[in-house]
């Protein structure tokens, strides 16, 4: 059983496998603006990716959020909802757009909304990387490419320049990541919803 409650633009998902719940993210700052970078439909097919399984229920033993913003030649791109949630997807309308509340299965790294919030929901506390998220999405990520966009990639983590490969960025609680392809954009902030 899956119950969805929408209140004040925040989606709450309750799964019958336990008493745990998760919100859609719902923070403020750099979110869903601009044209779509690329579809979520190119993502993995349900097979294990980089050791990350796609399971029927969210794994909430370890549940944190990170945020990703992508700019291409100075223009922000929207990161689609549903990355890491295998179709057919079930959606609800939220105050800021669709919220993917379920699907055939959910990878431990996924996105319910198009606001850039990455949900890390794992059966154990494990360090995951942005590269693994892109692998689930089946999109390239390197110092010269982000999804279909190519050019020099300038990377910021928590407002500071990150000079290594963006694939290596560790997704820890409230990590704020910005990838600029081509034109460098001053780092933008993101405020996570209280309690996430």
Image (tube, rainbow, N blue to C red):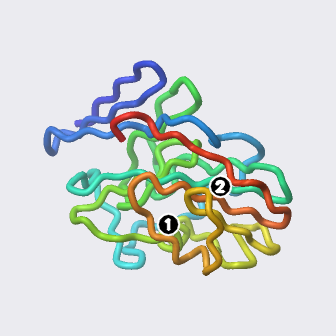
Vertical placement of 195 versus 48: above or below?
Answer: above
Vertical placement of 3 versus 169: above or below?
Answer: above
In the picture of the structure, the residue carrying the numbered disc 2 is: 39
Q: For this rendering, which residue is in front, 191 or 6?
A: 191
Image quarter where the C terminus lies is top left
Tell me residue 187's x, y (percent).
69, 54
Marks 1 and 2: in contact by CB < 8 Å?
no
> Which residue is located at x 65 percent, y 77 percent?
163
| Distance of label 2 from label 1 (alpha carbons) | 14 Å
| Mark 2 surroundings within 10 Å by alpha-carbon count, few (fewer than 14), some (14 through 19), many (20 or more) | some
Tell me residue 88's x, y (percent).
46, 48
On screen, residue 142 versus residue 152, left or right, reads: left
Vertical placement of 39 versus 52: above or below?
Answer: above
Q: For this rendering, which residue is in front, 148 or 61?
A: 61
Q: Earlier in the sequence, mark 2 or mark 1?
A: 2
Badge number at residue 150? none
Tell me residue 50's x, y (percent).
41, 79
On screen, residue 28 versus residue 4, left or right, reads: right
**Disc 2, SS:** loop
Answer with the quarter of the image where residue 151 lies: bottom right
Answer with the quarter of the image where residue 86 lies: bottom left
Badge number at residue 133? 1
Q: For this rendering, which residue is in front, 104 or 162?
A: 162
On screen, residue 183 versus residue 8, left or right, reads: right
> Which residue is located at x 44 percent, y 54 percent?
85
Which circle, 2 or 1, is nearer the viewer?
Answer: 1
**Disc 1, SS:** helix
């Amino acid at each position: 059983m899956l119950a969805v409650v929408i209140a004040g633009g925040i989606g709450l998902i309750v799964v019958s496998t336990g008493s745990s719940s998760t919100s859609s993210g719902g923070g403020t700052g750099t979110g869903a603006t601009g044209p779509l970078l690329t579809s979520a439909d190119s993502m993995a097919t349900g097979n294990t990716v980089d050791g990350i399984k796609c399971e029927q229920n969210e794994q909430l033993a370890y549940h944190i959020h990170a945020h990703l913003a992508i700019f291409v030649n100075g223009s922000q791109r929207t990161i689609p909802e549903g990355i890491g949630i295998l179709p057919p997807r079930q959606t609800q309308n939220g105050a800021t757009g669709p919220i993917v509340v379920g699907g055939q299965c959910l990878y431990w790294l996924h996105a319910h909304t198009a606001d850039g919030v990455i949900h890390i929901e794992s059966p154990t506390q494990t360090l995951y990387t942005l590269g693994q998220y892109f692998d689930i999405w089946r999109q390239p990520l390197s110092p010269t490419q982000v999804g279909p966009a190519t050019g020099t990639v300038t990377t910021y983590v928590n407002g500071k320049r990150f000079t290594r490969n963006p694939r290596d960025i560790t997704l820890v609680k409230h990590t704020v990541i910005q990838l600029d392809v081509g034109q460098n954009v001053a780092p933008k902030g993101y405020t996570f919803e209280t309690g996430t």
